[in-house]
Amino acid sequence: MHKVEFEQLDETLYHEKLSNGLEVFILPKKGFSKTFATFTTKYGSIDNHFVPRGAAEPVKVPDGIAHFLEHKMFEKEEGDIFQQFSKQGASANAYTSFTRTAYLFSATGKIDENVETLLDFVQEPYFTEATVEKEKGIIAQEITMYDDQPDWRLYFGIIENMYKNHPVKIDIAGTVESIQDITAEHLYTCYNTFYHPSNMVLFVVGAVDPEGMMKLVKENQSRKTFEEAHEIERIFPDEPVEAAIKERVLEMSVQKPKVFVGIKPEKTDLQGEEMLKHELAAELAFELLFGRTSDFYHEAYEKNWIDESYSFDYSLENGFGYAIIGSDTTEPQILAEEIKKTIAGAVEKWPFGQADLDRMRRKKIGFFLRALNSPEYIANQFTRYTFNGMNLFDVVPALERLEVADLQTAFSTVSRESQQSVFTILSPDKKEAE
Amino acid sequence: MFQTIRLAKGVNVHVNETTQFKTINISIKFKDKLSKEKASARSILANVLQHSNEIYPSHTALRMVLDDLYGTSLYMDSSKRGNEHIVSLNVETVNDQYLSESGVLEKVLNLMYLVLFKPNTENGLFKESIFLREKNAVKERIESIFDDKTRYAQQRMMDLALPEHPAAIPANGTIEEVQKISNERLMNEYRTMIETNEVEIYAVGDVKPEAIADYIQDYFHFEDREKASAAPSMELKKPAQQRVAEFEDMKQGKLHMTFFSPVTFRDEKFPVMQLLNGIFGGYAHSKLFVNIREKESMAYYVSSSYASQFGLMFVLAGIDGKLEEKAVRLILQQLEEVKAGNISDVEFEQTKALLINQLKEALDSARGQIDIYDQYMELTEAFEPDYLISRWNRVTKEDIAQAAKDLSLEMVYFLSGKESVANA
């Protein structure tokens, strides 16, 4: 077991890669009574075209299958795994993102039992045609619930606008129609391909004894047999740098129109240290340009183009990414134009210097230290970083190394007009009035 | 957990000195009686005060100082509890032992002082442009509830079921009342809040209780004030209608139900209701989740919640627009099971285990510590988890069945799409 001390942060991380390929991380937190654990596979909604384990040819699977599989992991021949966690005083949950499926629990007691349950239920699939059919009604209601949420439609609307071919444009849960095609056999194909320990990370953080926990995990894993680890072949279509759709309007009953401007990044093939540097630099650039201390925010707020719903977000993964800026607004056209103008202005003449960088750097360091109070943040983010070859605890030193020019360089790859798109939600009546 | 120091009559500082967190959290809570008018005025006030002040007269200036202080978060919010309305100033700042800089906490306390005592005024009123802007922001925040159909349905049901009851008053007030608030009225409310409201100040982190208390005593000058005599709790009156169906442009049906319980937070049987709620619909092992979601595949979410301040229990479910009757029948059937005492040992033990877990977990965050301590202060002087755990452990299945029998269904509210009517 490796032990890495981060003195500046007053944290110690324990790590070991087991012989079956599973990466195990343990981070004890002083003074905490709870333990939070995530067991995550590097498999999300975008992994819909791949060569199944043991097969020669690639297959395409129905939209929404990673999320469907996540739901079905909880059902076993002997019953529902939520019951088991409840008996052990733990709250369990799971989520599926574009790139990951995570199973998790938090508990203040019986941590050993709960970790065993977590490992065992994710490593013992049980799918039958009957249980798969039964789940369709539940997931259909989940999809319908999201369909009624304008903010979710806005978010997915702008991503659909930006991407032409990449599966990030497909809703994580699929559609009510697409999930009808899912069978138990599909689930086994996906499971066998992506749930091998070598494609997974276990993170345990909180009131935990690292030596004892590592021993328990190892013993648990050594009791099971796994096939050899192998490189998973995932197939992604070519994706142009340009946004697929420049502008689109969705009619939906809302109190006030909503608009998002999305910008597609040019560079999505970064990993490791390079990715960390690029991601932080771009985040800081967008924060300076669109954050609450920016000239843009000040003007937009004074002129009533934005309200409390205003947000901006920057996200980068392997193969895709996006910057998104927008708000509920009575002036969606003006707001979208002003956002674009602000980007163009920064491309033409870079407005930020050392003092701006120093301020943002302090802000980010503070945010990061605050986040380290949260076991949930640590486990989820650490896993995301690991899957991208980065280390979460490198954030502060990486921030300290950034220079103004790095921000400008990173920003220049997420800024061209051709990479931009606008998505607007208008109420049907309001649209007529315009 | 917390050490309490009295600064003046009606003004207390509660400090939990701990190295558990890398940050220091401070909350100053101003408590007043709840009314639609007060809630509306105080929500605007919270917005105006956090916008800017005399020393940092623009939003940007204030936010830049906060960024410089290692991204210290500072915000004000409006909330309610029972018959009380609470305005809080919340701050979280990095413990500077992790930084190369010291003196951060003093600067942050000074900022808190400016936010509360040096507002951005002109001619004895709040700066008009800021006042108008923030008044509009609060109005729009209330309006935006419409876009979240679960919150909207719950608010509609409360308005219909308990129109004048505190349970139905939103913490942010109402659009009508917000529109009526003038700058003069707001200045009045500000003075009332600072000079006469009961004040509870919380600090959690690596700080010395005396140091925090001394600083606040020296700079903030809070004077004696009367503890607002808690308004008598209003009786729950039967709603005029029992079944209401409304329609909006939407796909899913939102089923909301209201039950009355004679048991409130202050009641001896309060822990019984917490267990009842957990077994009935509070968790993933509950009767509603297992039967309506897992067995019937009818819903993605279905749950119950207990509003202990008022003695109300709600059931919420997202279902197909055509299945309202069936869902109501199945939900009530599950309640009958509880009434009949059909509670397995497993359900009973699981629920206790999760209540305990939830409580202990909440105490692993500084905000959670403050919220729980503030809530239970009225019942016990020095809250410790065991105060609740020992009470839960004394509850029997018979108690739970009896509490279920004492519930009365008062309203079934169903919000669904216009199409589902056409298809029905």
Image: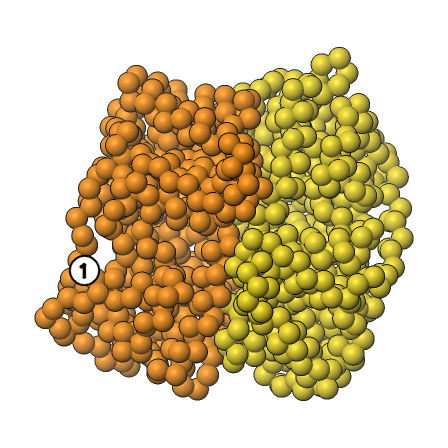
Percent of width and height locating residue B222: 79, 31
Q: Which residue lies furthest to the left in this view?
A: A56
At 67% from the left and 51% from the top, the residue drawn is B371
Q: Within 10 Å of the Cα at label 1, are there few (<14), some (14-19), or many (20+) other Cα atoms?
A: some
**Which sits in the foreground, A373 or A193?**
A193
**Which sits in the foreground, B334 or B285?**
B334
* Visible residue check, residue A322: yes
Percent of width and height locating residue A65: 32, 66
Percent of width and height locating residue A168: 30, 52
Color theme of the render: by chain
Which quadrant of the structure image shows residue A140? bottom left
**Which sits in the foreground, A89 or B24?**
A89
Q: Chain ID for label 1?
A: A
At 68% from the left and 24% from the top, the residue drawn is B131
* Chain painted in yellow in the figure: B
| Above or below, comparing residue B225 to residue B19 in the picture | above
| Above or below, comparing residue A385 to residue B263 in the picture | above
Which quadrant of the structure image shows residue A195? bottom left
Position of the C terminus of chain B, as image quadrant, is: bottom right
**Which sits in the foreground, A13 or A191?**
A191
Give the amino acid type for the residue marked by disc 1 in the picture.
Arg
Residue B190 relative to residue B204: left or right: right
**Residue of label 1:** A234
Residue A291 relative to residue A66: left or right: right
At 74% from the left and 32% from the top, the residue drawn is B179
Element carrying mark 1: loop
| Above or below, comparing residue A186 to residue B411 in the picture | below
* Chain painted in orange in the figure: A
* Visible residue check, residue A401: no
Q: Residue furthest top?
A: B123
